[in-house]
């Protein structure tokens, strides 16, 4: 018996493609965010509220992933920004190849922001680098406060946690402080914004996006 | 949940590796899986058994080395095992500690029959 040392990442192929994507995004100075949550936390709704508030001159494109249907792309297309649905067929996450394939028809030089709405799943999307600057995790107040402890990987990797549906807090037994403390215990530096589709926190979220975009444009923010 | 995709990625890399080591028989592949990798090790083993069936890899065995999450304190440099997701430094109390292990998802080595 002898051993051959391999010492390679299992997702080496994905990693290589993600690095190529990252190069392209860097070249065109595009801010790329990858939004991850359980199904039903409100990713599409947050994006609807975001697009609604965006100046139409903003050059934003979206990719949205689901196992089936074009429903989310239809919802998001109403605001006039280019949207493409990625139907994964059964795959529980988006990978770099899917992103690359769906970007080919778009002239990247004409865009400033790419928003990727991942498949609703807190586990698998975490492992796949899509060349993004930031992963953003969403947790809604109708879920459990302990989700950051149960699914720590995504909370560790996310730059920002969006605590959504906070308008429901008076009606649900959800301890928002406990949820935030749990997130901070697995990822001490995580940023947190509380939002609701009724409007609270959306200004803060839009400001976060604007700041990150400005940092990409000025060259101050380069993803590794 | 995506353990099958992971198994397929491993075998694809082994296909490539085999080309560089023609004529050798691979008997074992060893993976290194961190606790933050988001993988269920039992699922991985089960997926592995399913995927290798009736293929050239049928005789291959799988070894998994699980890696615990370890943190390092930027203030006092203590390295520690983060138990129960509590990442604060047990020595000086600093909360912004840095992950130094636990995110691994690697092929460590393959074993070859002589």
Image: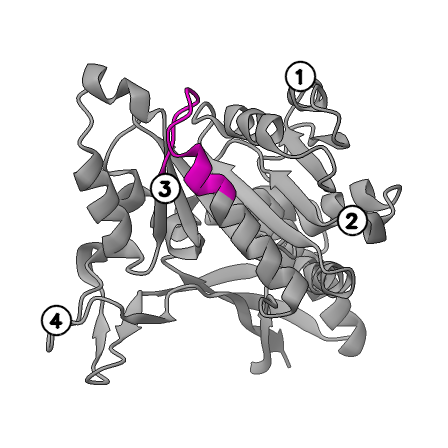
Element carrying mark 4? loop
Q: Are marks 1 and 2 on the same chain?
A: yes
Q: Is residue B92 left or right of residue B19?
A: left
Q: Say how many tags the image has.
A: 4
Give the residue at mark 3.
A193
Element carrying mark 3? strand
Quick one: label 2, few (<14), some, or many (20+) residues within 10 Å? some
Mark toward the viewer: 1 or 3: 3
Q: Nearer the viewer, residue B111 or B13?
A: B13
Earlier in the chain: of badge 1 and badge 2, it is 1
Is any part of residue A12 visible from this angle? no
Quick one: label 4, few (<14), some, or many (20+) residues within 10 Å? few
Mark pair 3, 4: CA separation: 26 Å
**Is A174 colored magenta in this rendering?**
no
Give the residue at mark 2.
A100
Mark toward the viewer: 2 or 4: 4
């Amino acid at each position: 018996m002898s051993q051959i040392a391999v010492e390679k990442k299992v997702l080496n192929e994905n990693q290589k493609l993600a690095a190529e994507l990252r190069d392209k995004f860097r070249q065109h100075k595009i801010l790329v965010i990858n939004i991850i949550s359980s199904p039903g936390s409100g990713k599409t709704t947050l994006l609807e509220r975001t697009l609604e508030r965006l100046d139409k001159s903003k050059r934003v494109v979206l990719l949205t992933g689901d196992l089936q249907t074009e429903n989310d792309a239809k919802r998001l297309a109403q605001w006039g920004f280019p949207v493409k649905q990625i139907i994964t067929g059964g795959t529980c996450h988006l990978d770099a190849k899917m992103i690359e394939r769906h970007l080919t028809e778009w002239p990247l030089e004409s865009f400033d922001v790419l928003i990727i709405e991942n498949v609703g799943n807190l586990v698998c999307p975490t492992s796949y680098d899509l060349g993004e600057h930031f992963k953003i995790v969403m947790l809604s107040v109708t879920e459990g406060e302990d989700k950051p402890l149960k699914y720590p990987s995504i909370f560790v990797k996310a730059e920002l946690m969006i605590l959504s549906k906070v308008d429901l807090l008076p009606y649900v037994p959800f301890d928002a402080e406990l949820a935030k403390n749990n997130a901070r215990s697995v990822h001490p530096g995580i940023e947190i914004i509380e939002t609701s589709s009724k409007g609270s926190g959306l200004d803060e979220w839009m400001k976060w996006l604007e700041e990150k975009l400005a940092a990409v444009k000025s060259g101050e923010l380069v993803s590794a | 949940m995506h353990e099958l995709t992971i198994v397929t990625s491993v075998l694809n890399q082994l296909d490539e590796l085999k080309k560089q080591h023609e004529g050798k028989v691979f008997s074992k592949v060893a993976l290194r899986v961190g606790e933050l990798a988001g993988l269920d090790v039992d699922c991985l083993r089960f997926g592995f058994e399913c995927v290798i069936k009736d293929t050239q890899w049928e005789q291959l065995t799988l070894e998994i080395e699980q890696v615990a999450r370890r943190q390092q304190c930027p203030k006092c440099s203590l390295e520690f095992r983060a138990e129960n997701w509590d990442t604060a430094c047990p020595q000086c109390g600093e909360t912004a500690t840095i992950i130094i292990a636990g995110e691994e998802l690697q092929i460590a080595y393959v074993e070859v029959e002589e």
